[in-house]
Amino acid sequence: MKIGFIGLGIMGKPMSKNLIKAGHELVVYDIVKENVEDVVAAGAKAAGSVKEVAEQCSLIITMLPNSPHVKTVVMGEGGILEGAKEGTVLVDMSSIAPLASQEIARACAAKGVKMIDAPVSGGEPKAIDGTLSIMVGGEKAVFDEVYDVLMKMGASAVHCGDIGAGNTTKLANQVIVALNIAAVSEAFMLAKKAGVDPHLVFDAIKGGLAGSTVMNAKAPMMMDGNFKPGFKIDLHIKDLNNALETGHGVGSPLPLTAAVMEMMQTLKSDGCGQDDHSALAKYYQKLTGTEIRG
Ligand code: NAD
């Protein structure tokens, strides 16, 4: 099946390559030329614009930073809806606000385009392995139609409800990840300041109740002082913003999320927005003047 893929960044690049490996013909577009060249070298065909992708493909995947980018690419001038035929399926895999997914899906429906929101969890390593966790909102029939394609990029794809439900699930995921990284940072700094080697703390507790996928992935980065992204602080701020806005909208206060958000904002102001989100450890390093590393 010929698939359009728009947004070839940290995630979109390996995801699109997995579709090529699975035998799909891909037509790709990104505003960054080098990203397009990289995926073309793996076997994709480059389109000159978003509209051109839409004209050529009846299944289109988008993997863009946030709501405004997806709105522009889908609803903007020269966007997907200008080129798409009736019956085209749009799978937006970006992490965006659930309300934005609903607004974009309404504009799609008016042109006979069927949209689902299908954000992912797992980060670059799982995007490369094709083992992402995919959470989907939208019509079940459309989910069923694209399930096999989703499973070329993921280890699981779960239909969570109507349009926007995928992104609501992703916000829950991002709240848990952010708070867990903050907790690991706080606890490892406590150990370091109290004179216990964080490596030994990690070995001692990782198999117990405090153990987590987040701790396994992020504690070694903190102990190495390696904050190369991965998932950037700037993108996590975007997700927590969407979580806070959604929480306020539905009457679900998020006090812990608000606290970690301010920690991330502090780091951003300090020039760390492009660091991996494990750089929350740096917040504690600033408070104590001590590094977890070493
Ligand atoms: P990224 O910034 O690396 O990639 C985004 C890509 O979109 C870039 O290549 C950019 O050039 C392109 N783009 C932006 N505007 C465009 C436009 N108008 N037309 C065409 N291309 C355009 O971001 P990423 O890390 O790949 O993340 C993408 C999405 O996936 C985000 O919503 C992010 O929150 C989510 N996500 C990321 C990770 C991760 O670990 N990086 C994990 C899970 C989910």
Image (cartoon, rainbow, N blue to C red):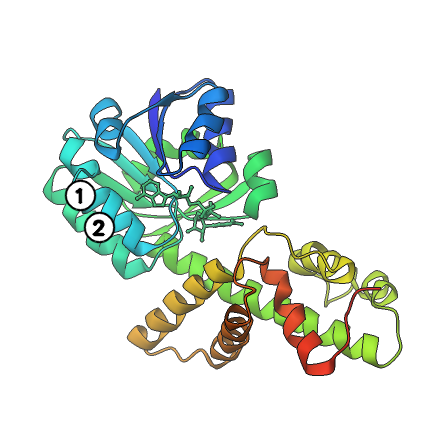
Q: Which residue is drawn at the image coordinates 45% and 30% (left, top)?
A: 16
The residue closer to the viewer here, 82 or 228, is 228
Quadrant placement of the N terminus = top left
The mark total stands at 2
Q: Which residue is drawn at the image coordinates 45% and 26% (left, top)?
A: 37
Quadrant placement of the C terminus = bottom right
Asked whether residue 113 is in view, the answer is no
Q: Which residue is drawn at the image coordinates 40% and 33% (left, top)?
A: 33
Q: Which residue is drawn at the image coordinates 82% and 76% (left, top)?
A: 191
For this view, does 69 lie left or right of residue 156? left
Q: Amino acid at mark 1?
A: Cys
| 217 shown above or below 149 | below
| 68 shown above or below 11 | below
C-alpha gap between disc 2 and disc 1 = 6 Å
Q: Amino acid at mark 2?
A: Ile
Q: Percent from the top left, x then y, of residue 289? A: 74, 79
Residue on which disc 2 sits: 104
